[in-house]
Image (cartoon, helix red, strand yellow):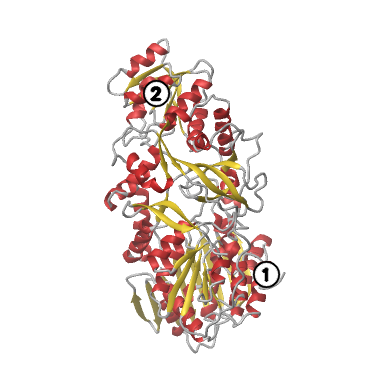
Amino acid sequence: MLSLPMKQVAQSYKTGVLTLADVARPARAPAGGILVETGVSLISAGTERAIVDLARKSLVEKARERPDLVKKVIDRARREGVLAALDAVRAKLDSPIPLGYSLAGRVADVGKNAQGFARGDRVACAGAGYANHAEVNAVPKNLAVHVPDGVSDEEASFVTVGAIALQGVRLARPELGDVVVVIGLGLIGQIAVQLLTAHGCDVIGIDIERGKVERALARGAVAGAVSGVDDAVEVVRAASRGYGADAVVITASSPTAEPLALAGELARDRARVSVVGLLPLEIPRKAYYEKELEVVVSRSYGPGRYDADYEERGHDYPIGYVRWTERRNLQAVLRAIATKRLDVSGLVTHRFPFERALDAYALITGERPEPHLGVLLTYEASGADGPSGAPAAPVPRAHARGDVGLAVVGTGSFATGVLLPAFEKTRGVRLVRTVSGRGLSARHAADKFGAEGVAASLDEVLALPEVSAVVIATRHDTHAALAARALAAGRDVFLEKPAAVDEEQLAMLGEAVRGSAAQLMVGYNRRFAPFARAAREAFAGRRAGLVMSARINAGRIPAGNWVVDADEGGGRVVGEVCHFVDLLSYWAGAPPVRVSAHAIGPDGGWERADNLVVGLSFADGSVATLAYTAMGDPSVSKERYELLCEGKVAVIDSWRTLEVTAKGKTKTTRALKADKGHGEEVRAFAEACRSGGAAPIPWESIEATTRATFAIERAWRDGEAVAVGSP
């Protein structure tokens, strides 16, 4: 089947330009998630305006806003050269931003392990990157909740901002009879006022706009003050019998810490300050010290936020230990709306049909000056009843060898920042389709690199006879199955590493390779680097084995990242160390036959797979040590290699210098930019596709490298050397 087109709001992070982009409609619901046809989405005026404003700033202004990212760029420039750092910055700036994070709609499709949902269910969804301003969205199950009867789609579209307000209120720990101040009476602040009132609190609202203060008074606040006009301290003192506020909830966003200073003045001794809004956390010591105030920063919708295991993989927290997760907060908001304890319909000031979304953003950014609060986008029903039939059957490659018709499946940062630029520079390659689980990145890649169109799935591109080769750059656990499907359809495959994450996948892929006349290339790029080839040539004609060492200053990856997840990414050994095993095998000219491994245990405070030293023996008699660690300083070079044999030494540092020493003389070669071989590996693959010649890396080598990574994992777990390929 062909994917249906749809539209999505996107913004260029580089220029700040907003567009209503044409993207591919997701073909099916993801595993552990649902496909939702949007009925109404809410523009969060404060949060989304801040995102839009940041994107519209100059590069210098962006750098001032994010000094943490500037430091990363400087560190990368030290390691890999200024040109490499600039390329990374350009790639980041060039990436489009999906906007939106709160919507209501109907379920169009249900993925595997998304129990509790059925097609046609009314749902409300949350999450930046998931609940986008788009006609159809793929949403993980823990970011979607059912909408109760009696709650309209418009009301349900407030679910996310309601949960943000609710989490900020929960952290303030309100009790019946408390006096609570809400600073900032935008959308989230207005909801916080009502939730606190429902808790039995006396609420005082403060804002810079009198109209917003009056709106809060109409929704339950007992008093209000216009900041800079009224004496807020006196208003709070009068409402609290002179004691001051028991708690302050800051929902305002500000470039200064003025709201924090005001909260310190308004609070009583040992009061609580819950910070929800975006503002500098510069706490004025005197007031906060003298009153011994408690400050807590609210993390969005609640427990589970930013936890990939919870949000992406659907692992819930037991209710006995975490009563109010972000999903249960979403449900609580809808329940409050259903029982009339929370009125959000009265907060709607504007409605725009989705095709006029850019007019709505002109309103919230001030280009169209007009008071506003709740701004809704409404969508027409697509008429589609779930996925439209069975996937189209693959068609065999119907043309002779020659120019390569390419489809790229997976258009994340590596594909768009490294692989596609390399293919663009390669003779005889024509980009036919780009494919992504999230259509916006595929659309951006297609526009940037001149693809003829976008698609929603691998099946769709395999039905196109003009596609002769497929690049697979998806998450690691999908590699083997996707590659096997493409090989079975007679397409040459460039598969990003690793080839597989377990023995079962490797066996399946091996069967597909042996049963197909098509090429398989795995993205072990380092063997194609100029310095890697020069180092191998330096030892040409050797009669003894090489003694090799590799030190990889890998850096830490957060525990919840998919790369380190054993099922999804295979872990760092399978997913990353494979690169270096392949390179050492290339230098040896022989496969690894035995490995040992030692790792720093959990008592060292580090993950074992992040810090290990591997010993490898190769079939030609060469040996190697591979030190892979996340404990180093990131400003130091990431990779350093040494090769020794028969009175000669070669040293590669950060792919920017190569030193070859023999007979007391050293020849040093330097590069302005680190070249890890990506361009040459792509050219080698394209040439093999055009000519039908041998694959650039034999399957036997790919298989041996992959089995070696499995052996390394067994070796450090069991504490003994393991033969490569042994069960």
Q: Earlier in the sequence, mark 2 or mark 1?
A: 2
Residue 560 in picture, x, y percent from top left: 55, 50
- Seen in the picture, residue 188 relative to 708 is either above or below; the reply is above
Give the image quarter of residue 538: bottom left
Q: Nearer the viewer, mark 2 or mark 1?
A: 2
Give the image quarter of residue 236: top left
Instruction: Locate the N terminus by quadrant.
Output: bottom right
- Seen in the picture, residue 226 relative to 46 is either above or below; the reply is above
Left or right: 580, with 450 as reference point: right
- The amino acid beneath tag 2 is Arg
Does residue 264 appear in the picture of this structure?
Answer: no
Q: Residues within 10 Å of mark 1 (few under 14, many from 20)?
A: many
Residue 215: mark: 2
In the picture of the structure, the residue carrying the numbered disc 1 is: 722
- The amino acid beneath tag 1 is Val
Element assignment for label 1: strand
